[in-house]
Each structure stands twice: as structure tokens, then as C-alpha cells.
Image (cartoon, helix red, strand yellow):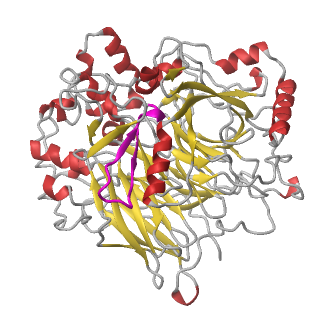
Amino acid sequence: MSTEPRRLLPLMTSHPGGRSAVTCEYRCGNACAHPAPNTSDNEYFGDVAKDVLSRRGALKAGAVMAAAAGGFAALSGTAAAAEPAGVEAAGRGRPARKVPGTDFDKVPPNTNDAVTIPPGYDQRIVIRWGDPVVPGAPKFDFAKQTAAAQEKQFGYNNDFVGLIPQDPLGLRSLLVANHEYTTETHMFPADQYDKNNPTEEQVRIAWAAHGLSVVQVTRDLLRGGLHVVPSRYNRRITLNTPFEVRGPAAGSQYLKTSADPTGRRILGTQNNCAGSVTPWGTVLSGEENVNQYFGHAGEVTDPVVAARLKRYGFSGAESTRKWERFDKRWDVRAEPNETNRFGWVVEIDPNDPNSTPIKHTHLGRFKHEAAAVKIARDGRVVAYSGDDERFEYIYKYVSNGKYKPGKSAHARRHNSALLDDGTLYVGRFTGDSPAGEIDGSGRLPSDGEFDGVGEWIPLAAGNKSFVDGFTAEEVYVFTRLAADKVMPTKMDRPEDIEPNPVNGRVYVALTNNSDRGKAGKAGVDEANPRNINRNGHVLEFEEIGDATSTKFAWRLLLVCGDPKEADTYFGGFDKNLVSPISCPDNVAFDPHGNLWISTDGNALGSHDGLFSVPVTGPERGYVKQFLSVPVGAETCGPVVTDNVVLVAVQHPGENADSSANPTSHWPDGGNSQPRPSIVSVWRKGAWGLPGRIGIR
């Protein structure tokens, strides 16, 4: 998502959480109610290292020496020592000036059925579920939906939002949104939908409501916000859209089905969670909780196939949505390889509405929250991705070929192909504190930070596997099982991962893990330092050398939760001043390099929201809530520019059992049904004209 910047100052300076039962069922198939699929019993490397190397000082010294060799300043030392030269430690929490991009009045935690924004800001709906996307789309009618209409309308449960400017001033842009999942009990009138006996038309409506939407938007220079306009670029991608399979697993025996004996053409994409805009102007989107859509996985008797299905969370008899009744590809007994055709990073080219979307197999198959790209100093493409489940891993891909600058059709094709020839790695994180100081309480170790070093372990490159017992083909299709063999670090639900375009570091949202430290589960380590971690944390790392390196240094920027509690940490900032934050999900950056975090499943009793936090200087760690979302909703997206903030409000009102008694009437008010929507927010400036975000 970013090019590698010039080297800056050193970095020395009911259900788990707040989710409703309905959301848990339809979004991820009640993943948290089932045993975590990662049951690998390899001893965690970090624990081994601490037992063998009781040498915290030597480890830090080694990191510093490696850093010096690569022109990198190690991520070590206390919070006070971590500040750039000239910043007094005593001044933290009471800075003399506001950080550009974050100068707004905090929104207090609340339970409003609205998008609540700071004073001096305004908002407008950009697009909502059912609004027209392509020509001929009819007006949305909640009681009279059809699959033909939904194929042309904005899909359900918008998650990722990407904005691709089409002119230097960003007056016209292409907006791309994922449609992660469908909640049929809320999509249809209660007297029309029978959960146990859906109609074929209702199933086809759901297929059409998945995927992605592309719309052209214009920025209103007088009143603020974005507007959707008719355009040849406007497009819907659904579960009926053909995708090209690319990379070393294209044509794999594990991808072939009766409908596609080539293993190179897949219909559709589903459960698309977060994503990113590439430096060449395309969009990468991650397929996440795909296991819940398939029926009868529990009836597979082949022990090898059954073990692979189990590792990816496929189980049970009929699926929640009953799609397998209407198309055998969703029946694992009939088409066991169809399960392997989802769980990839997909790429679409919004600038070419006639292009065929791609599934990139070299980035591995798992529950991708997203994939985000940066360009290394030598021109190679580096892509980061997290596997969003308890005790899963963080991955990196490095291309062999080099990036071609520009966003022409030729450059886009060239750069897209870079994702199909390189090396796939998985991450191992090692702390630098004595094991006894990481006791699961969240209490900081004696050096004042959770930090350490790490390495990227190669899994496969092209047709070469680096994992004993696995072919390269198996590494890509069954990436989780291959990664288990090399002892990476089991993380607390690694979700969105984004490189910061200003300071070059990479930031990871680790949403939560209420199983951490339970009997029979993985215990704490310095990168995941709390038992029963309901509130999550944010990790920051920097490659030692450049983005293609196999070594990195890391530390936790935030340990989220109620700042009044002892087990929280805000980059060393005064906890009395910060906003409470729980369950970080998506991350983004504003033009100043400040981190923005959207949350999912707030476990603190208030609604999810969007938060800003500077990552350098005296306000490093100063979390401020910018907005909150309505009843039952999750904050997704986001996009933060100088002029506008975009968030996707996902599943409003989903804490109701069905559409019969909605708990939210957002965004249309009155007695209306809630509709997932994208919102634009802007600052009201002088003379009523829009101002700059976070600058008074």
C-alpha cells in the first residue's frame, strides 16, 4: 500500500467481546464457540528461547548490532527513551502543540443509534445496501427483493473501503467496497424468510449480495462529503463473477472440480474482509471465514482430507445458509476441492471494468483479513497478511521481480504479476524480557515495554518448498498446516496489517483472544502478553535493513482496554487522557502518518468506533475517539484523507434476533430497517466550506 520511505529518525523514542450472537453465527460461523483449529503442539519458539537464553541484554545487543549493520535503530528501551531527540519524557501527556490530523474534540463512549462525530464536523451517507450501482438497477425494496436486482445494487455488509483518485486533486475517485457476508435473517422480512427452508431465490440474492462494488464518487467542494455518480467504471463483483487463478498453485490438483477440471477458473469471492489499494492502483481483498458456507464437511471420511478440512474450520452437517441444497459446489461430499478455491487474496482492477479479477495463490491460503503492499528500496514488492483466527500467524511475501512505477494498464498488469513469483514467509516473534516478567497479567516488564526481535521463516518460493513433508503446491493450498511445521508465533487474531507510508513501520491489529492462557491452549508470550485477552492490542514492527529482510524488531504500541485498568498500555502516554479502545480491527493512516484504528466487538460496554493515535513524538500513544457507530454495528474501512473520513458501518442492528424487531433504524430513521452503509465525514471550515481533517 505504500512505497518504502526515506529512513527517518530512529524509533528510539453472551459472546466474546461485544458481538451479538447473530453476528457470530453469520459472520464467522460461531468461530469463537468452536475449538481453535490450530491444535499444533509444537513448543512455542519464544518459550524455548527464554529457557535457553536467559540473556536479555545479549539479545538486545544482538539486535542493536544487526540494526547498525543495516542502518536501523533497534526497537528497544523505555517509552521515555523511545522519543526523538529534544522531547522531554516529563512532557508526555501534556504536549505543547497539537499533532496535525488529530486536533479534534474526542467523542465520548456512547450507545447512540447514530454515527456520532466531533463538534464542528458533518456527515453524509455515500451509499447504502440496495442503492443502485450499475445502469438498470431498480430502487431498493426491502419487501420485494430479487437476485437480478441485487446483482446491480450495492451489496450487503460493507467492510473494506478503498479510494482511488482519478485526478491530482482527488475531485473524482473510484470507491471500492467489500461485501463481507450476508445475514439472511435481517436481509429479508421475518414473514418471508425461514432459516431452515430458504428459497432458491433468497439464496441467489445472497450470492449477489457478496463480493465487491466499484462506484465513481465526486467530492463536494462547497458542502463536503462524497457523492456517487453514474459512470462506466461502476461495477458489481459477486459469487457469480469468474476469477482467474494465478501463481504456482494455478491448475493444482487440489483446485480442480467437476465444473472446472482445469483448476484455473473460480466463480466468485466471499467473506471478503479488509483489503488495500496497491501502489499501482488496484485493490487487494482478503477472503476470510469461508468455511461457514459449506455443508456436510463433517461427513468426509478420508482421513487426510478430513484433517485438512478441520485445520481450516470446516465441520458439521448442513450449513447455516443451506446453499448446498441449490448448488452442489457448497456440498463438501460432492465437491471436496471447492473448499480449497476460497481463502485467497483476490485482486481487482477498478480502472478496467472489463478486467477479470484474480486469485493470487502465491500469497497462501488461510483466513486472510487483508493484504497490504509496500515497495522495498530495491523495487521488489512486499505484501503483508494476517490469518484472522485465534492462535494463527502473520505472513509476508516478497516478489522476485521489481515494481514498475505508474498506473497505466501496462504497469498495472506488470505489477500484478509480481504477486505470482516470489517467496512466502511466516513470522516468528521473540521477546527480550525474562519469562517470569511475562506473567499473563499485562503488567509491563522491567524494561518498560513489550518488545523484541523476530524473523521471517520461508515456506515456499515458486515450485520449491522449504517445509519438510510438503510440496510447494501443498504449502500454498494448505498454508496453515505447512506453517505449523516451522514453529511460528501463535498470535491473538492478527487482522489488518498496514505499512505506514510516512515512517515505514508496519502496524498490526491483534483483535482479541479470550482463549489465551486457558488450559490446553497456548500461554502468553511477549508479543501476546495477556491471558484471556478480550480487548486486543496493536503491534508495530520495522524490518532490519529494508522490507525484504528476514529480520525485524518489534514492540507493542497499544495494549487496549479500559485505561483505568492496570493491564493497558498506550505507548507510554498518560492513560488519564486517552479514549478507551477495545478490539482493534482495521488500521489506516492519514497523510501525516497518524494511525487510525476501527474497532469490532467493543468489550467495554459502548459502541465500536474510529480512533486516531500519533505514532511518533510526545503524543505517541494518545488514543482519541473520532466517531462511534450505531446500535449493533461495527466500524470498518476506514479511509482518512486531508478532506474526508470514510467508514463502512457494518451490520447495524444485528443484535436483534431478526428483522421483525429491529434494534436500529440507521441510516434512514423512523421505523425503517437498518442498512449497512458507507459514511463520509468532514470538518466544517470557514464560511461554511469544508476544512481539513484534524486541523483547526
Q: What percent of the width, then of the height, locates residue 32?
A: 42, 30
* Nearer to the camera, 449 or 337: 337
Question: From the viewer's perspective, is 13 left or right of 672?
Answer: right
- Which region is colored magenta? 345-364
Residue farthest to the front? 410
Note whether residue 480 is visible.
yes
Q: What percent of the width, then of the height, locates residue 648?
A: 41, 58
Q: What percent of the width, then of the height, locates residue 316?
A: 26, 22
**Residue at the image point whose x is 53% and y is 73% from the top:** 168
**Residue at the image point whose x is 16% and y is 67% from the top:** 136
Give residue 341's quadrant in the image.
Answer: top left
Q: What percent of the width, then of the height, locates residue 310?
A: 36, 19
Q: Is residue 653 above or below residue 329?
A: below
Give residue 559's quadrant in the image.
Answer: top right
Q: Is residue 77 above or below residue 300?
A: below
Question: From the viewer's perspective, is 164 left or right of 78?
Answer: left
**Residue at the image point whose x is 69% and y is 68% from the top:** 100
Q: Residue 614 magenta-drawn? A: no
Note whether residue 37 is visible.
no
Q: Quadrant of the C terminus?
A: bottom right
* Nearer to the camera, 241 or 558: 241
Residue farthest to the bottom? 687
Q: Is residue 195 above or below residue 274?
A: above
* Nearer to the camera, 543 or 54: 543
